[in-house]
Image: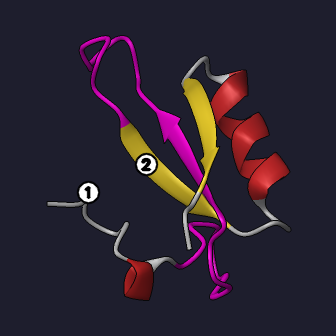
Amino acid sequence: MAEPGLESDERICSAKGCQQPAGFDLRWNNPKIHTEDRRKHWLACAEHRESLAKFLSARGFLREIEPLAP
């Protein structure tokens, strides 16, 4: 079973107010409350990939960014 929100018909950018199709999976966790192997997902369109990644990186949460398969 796929992660919630990762099915192809639900791939909408996680940026506030954005309704564009997502092309990237920003995988993150908060090390203060999540185990090392736990990953949460924010989806991003090309326009918001950098700003969402910077937000997560500034807090030390970003783990990896992967392109979404079509």
Where is the C terminus found, in terms of image quarters?
bottom right
Q: Position of residue 13 (x, y in %)?
A: 60, 72
What mark, if any, has residue 41 been given in the picture? 2
Q: Residue at x 72, y 40 (%)?
A: 53
Q: Earlier in the sequence, mark 2 or mark 1?
A: 1
At mark 2, the secondary structure is strand
Report the amino acid beneath label 1: Glu
Magenta span of residues: 12-39
Quadrant for the N terminus in the image: bottom left
Residue at 38% x, 13% y is 31
**Residue drawn at 76 percent across, 55 percent down:** 49
Foreground pick, 38 / 59: 38
Image quarter for residue 24? bottom right
- Residue lying at 49% horizontally and 38% vertically, measured from the top left: 27
What percent of the width, then of the height, locates residue 4?
A: 25, 64
- Residue of label 1: 3
Q: Residue reaching furthest left?
A: 1
Tell us which disc is closer to us: 2 or 1. 1
